Image (tube, helix red, strand yellow):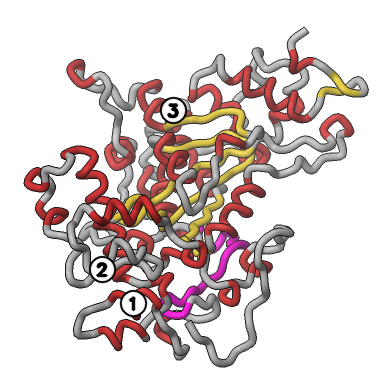
């Protein structure tokens, strides 16, 4: 008898049901798995064993995309998430041309990282975190986002069926170049590994799905080449406006995935066209997608979550600028923001990362470094307040930055905005507040010192 078939009190354990379903889906292609997850088939796939079959009706499909600061990809700035349950998908009836009924049933969540709210895109062709077109943008700290993701990936099944008591909804995870986004969530900051969730029964990468359905057939001399998201979207008949914004990418990845599992007869209509469907989904999402988590505002001057930087009147001090700003605007910079949102530290970190990467590639041969890296961090950049004294500032040698990076990482007080700047209960939209950690309600209005 296989291990997953062992029973407790005559019933399989919840985790045994999930493992059985995950093992069954390993035998199927991405298209088949996604069709099952969205209720396309009249019957459950034959390889799904009896103990896993009751879970299938409770599948939730989640599409995820992450984005980072364009100057420093170690610093996540956004996470976009789109989801739909199998029950919701079945409830819309026939999907319609281009799957428009399914597309309109999608729910959208756009999270901006509160700690990195000051980091915007420097690309001329992308608005980055400011360019979201789906649902509503909300700010969360890394710690809040971990709690939210843990909930979304571990939802208990709501049912009166005794056999499913204690079971959680299976998750089918979708992404474009999905491995990249899963790796991004595990980086310092969010530190959340989606694949650790036992509820994750299958992963569908739209790059693999595009190959399966012959939307993408790479040239013979480029057999390992994968299709880019913009190319995929355009091949399927709609536009990718404001790309590299997390929820825009997640939304259109999910829309592509739905499009690619439909029968040919639903893909040929020009009434509506796929572009018309995409436009309507975008417009409806702003009204139909709830945003129960996070806060509407965050101030990138003082860190509070009840106003924007334009309305800030707080007295603030940046410890990093106070210690290391040697420019003519020292006094102004010291009192223009708290250290969490110091643009000079952000520039220094971005340069330091590029210097580290160049050192790995070229060793000590500075002549081989990219010019912008070899020139140093620039006059408008400096390290954080706990930069080691033995390394010193300004740097005696550019390579000294490697010593500093080995000695210190971001101090804890820079990883999260100050406790007084968070309203955990409000930001978590009713989810349970973790028992550990320094959680407090929003402080009363009054003097706010950085």
Q: Measured along the vertical axis of the image, is residue 323 above or below residue 4?
A: below
At horizontal 41% and vertical 58% (from top left) the residue drawn is 77
Instruction: Give the x, y percent position of residue 287.
Output: 54, 63
At horizontal 42% and vertical 56% (from top left) the residue drawn is 409
The stretch in magenta equals 284-302
Q: Quadrant of residue 273?
A: top left
- Which comes before the other along the chain, label 3 or label 2? 3
Mark closer to the observer (3, 1):
1
At horizontal 28% and vertical 51% (from top left) the residue drawn is 402
Per the rendering, the mark at residue 265 is 3
Per the rendering, the mark at residue 323 is 1
Most foreground residue, 38 or 177: 177
How far is mark 3 from mark 2, CA to CA?
66 Å
Q: Can you see residue 431?
A: no
Question: For this view, does 432 lie left or right of residue 26?
Answer: right
For disc 1, the neighbor class at 10 Å (few under 14, some 14 to 19, many from 20) is some
* Label 3 SS: helix
Question: For this view, does 125 lie left or right of residue 387?
Answer: left
Q: Can you see residue 298?
A: yes
Q: Quadrant of residue 391?
A: bottom left
Instruction: Report if the CB atoms under discs 1 and 2 are less than 8 Å apart.
Output: yes
* Residue matched to label 2: 393
């Amino acid at each position: 008898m296989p291990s997953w078939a062992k029973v407790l009190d005559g019933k399989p354990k919840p985790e045994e049901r999930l493992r059985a379903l995950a093992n069954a889906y390993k035998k199927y292609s991405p298209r088949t798995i996604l069709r099952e997850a969205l209720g396309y088939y009249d019957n459950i796939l034959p390889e799904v064993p009896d103990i896993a079959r009751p879970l299938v009706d409770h599948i939730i499909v989640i599409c995820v995309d992450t984005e980072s600061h364009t100057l420093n990809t170690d610093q996540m700035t956004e996470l976009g998430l789109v989801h739909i349950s199998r029950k919701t998908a079945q409830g819309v009836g026939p999907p319609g041309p281009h799957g428009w009924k399914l597309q309109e049933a999608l729910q959208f969540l756009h999270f901006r990282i509160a700690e990195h709210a000051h980091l915007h895109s420097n690309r001329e062709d992308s608005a980055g975190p400011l360019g979201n077109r789906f649902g509503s943008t909300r700010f969360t700290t890394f710690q809040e986002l971990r709690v939210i993701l843990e909930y979304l990936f571990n939802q208990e099944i709501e049912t009166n069926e005794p056999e499913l008591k204690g079971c959680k909804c299976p998750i089918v995870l979708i992404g474009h170049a999905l491995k990249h986004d899963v790796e991004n969530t595990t980086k310092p900051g969010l530190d959340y590994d989606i694949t650790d969730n036992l509820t994750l029964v299958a992963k569908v990468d739209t790059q693999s799905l595009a190959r399966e359905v012959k939307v993408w057939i790479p040239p013979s001399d480029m057999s390992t080449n994968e299709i880019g998201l913009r190319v995929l979207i355009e091949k399927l008949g709609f536009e990718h406006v404001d790309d590299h914004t997390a929820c825009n990418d997640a939304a259109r990845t999910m829309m592509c995935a739905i499009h690619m599992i439909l029968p040919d007869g639903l893909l040929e209509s020009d009434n509506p066209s796929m572009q018309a469907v995409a436009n309507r989904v975008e417009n409806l999402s702003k009204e139909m997608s709830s945003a129960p988590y996070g806060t509407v505002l965050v101030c990138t001057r003082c860190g509070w979550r009840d106003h924007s930087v334009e309305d800030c009147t707080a007295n603030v001090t940046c410890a990093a600028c106070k210690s290391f700003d040697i420019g003519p605007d020292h006094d102004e910079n010291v009192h223009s923001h708290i250290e969490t949102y110091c643009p000079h530290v952000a520039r220094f970190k971005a340069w330091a990362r590029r210097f580290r990467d160049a050192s790995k590639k070229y060793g000590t041969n500075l002549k081989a470094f990219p010019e912008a890296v070899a020139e140093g961090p620039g006059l408008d950049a400096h390290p954080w307040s706990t930069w080691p004294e033995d390394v010193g500032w300004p740097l005696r040698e550019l390579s000294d930055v490697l010593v500093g990076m080995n000695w210190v990482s971001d101090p804890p007080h820079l990883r999260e905005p100050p406790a007084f700047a968070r309203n955990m209960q409000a930001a978590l939209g009713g989810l349970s507040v973790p028992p550990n950690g320094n959680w407090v309600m929003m402080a009363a209005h009054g003097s706010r010192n950085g």
